Amino acid sequence: MDESRRPVVSIVMGSDSDFPKLEGCIRILKEFGVKSEARVISAHRSPELAHEFAAAAEERGVGVIIAAAGGAAHLAGVIASLTTLPVIGVPISSSAMQGVDALHSTVMMPPGVPVATVGIDASLNAAVLAVQILALADPDLRSALKAYKAKLAAGVQAKSQKIQKQLES
Ligand code: RP5
């Protein structure tokens, strides 16, 4: 594959029904200019594919894996058991338990096999964390992250000013 087109972040999800919850993740990675790919892989419905994917990811040049799943969410954990790449888990609120089940299934990993778990449906944070990991070896990404954080701070200040104006009027 043409090196410049290799995905650096691989986003995997348990079902296409999870895809709408990954909109924030995809947007942030695009904003930072980080190449990504998205795949549907199920730890339970397509376990061989999950194994194949995890075993080959590093060799394909993937740096960080973001794994999103709902219900009894084992996708991130299974992938983390088969690779030394950092795996970020996104619990999805797709079941009757509104993602609490997926949160516990994703975060409660055994010692030695971590999954960096973000909040329920918090795929945007998964992307920011992925960029922060990649930024360790990329000064341009580090600068872009500093600008992003400065924008967040400016947004808070603007909200504060808006509230103050409302109180004064
Ligand atoms: C999980 O089951 C998926 O990650 C999804 O959140 C949920 C429902 O999947 P579908 O029945 O919509 O395929 O494995």
Image (cartoon, grey):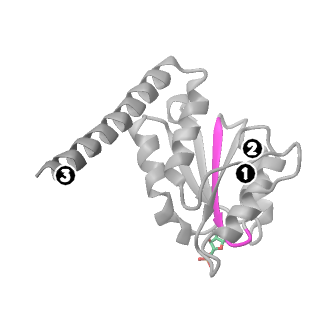
- CA distance for labels 2 and 1: 5 Å
- Nearer to us in this view, 139 or 157: 157
Which residue corresponds to mark 3?
A: 167
Q: Main secondary structure of the magenta part?
A: strand
Percent x, y for residue 118? 62, 51
Quarter holding residue 31: top left
Percent x, y for residue 60? 67, 37
Q: Residue at x 59, y 61 (%)?
A: 120
The reply to whether the C-beta atoms of the residues labelled 2 and 1 are less than 8 Å apart is yes
Q: Which mark is residue 56?
A: 2
- Tell me which segment is drawn in magenta: 63-72
Residue furthest to the right in view is 111
Q: Amino acid at mark 2?
A: Ala
- Nearer to us in this view, 161 or 34: 161
Q: Residues within 10 Å of mark 3 (few under 14, many from 20)?
A: few
Q: Quadrant of the N terminus?
A: top right
Q: Secondary structure at mark 1?
A: helix
Quarter holding residue 108: bottom right
Q: Secondary structure at mark 2?
A: helix
Residue 62 visible: no
Q: Residue at x 79, y 45 (%)?
A: 114
- Asked if residue 143 is positioned above or below residue 99 in the image, the reply reads above
Figure quarter occupied by ligand 1: bottom right
Q: Residues within 10 Å of mark 2 (few under 14, many from 20)?
A: few
Which residue corresponds to mark 1?
A: 53
- CA distance for labels 1 and 3: 55 Å
- CA distance for labels 3 and 2: 58 Å
Q: Secondary structure at mark 3?
A: helix
- Asked if residue 99 is positioned above or below residue 64 in the image, the reply reads below
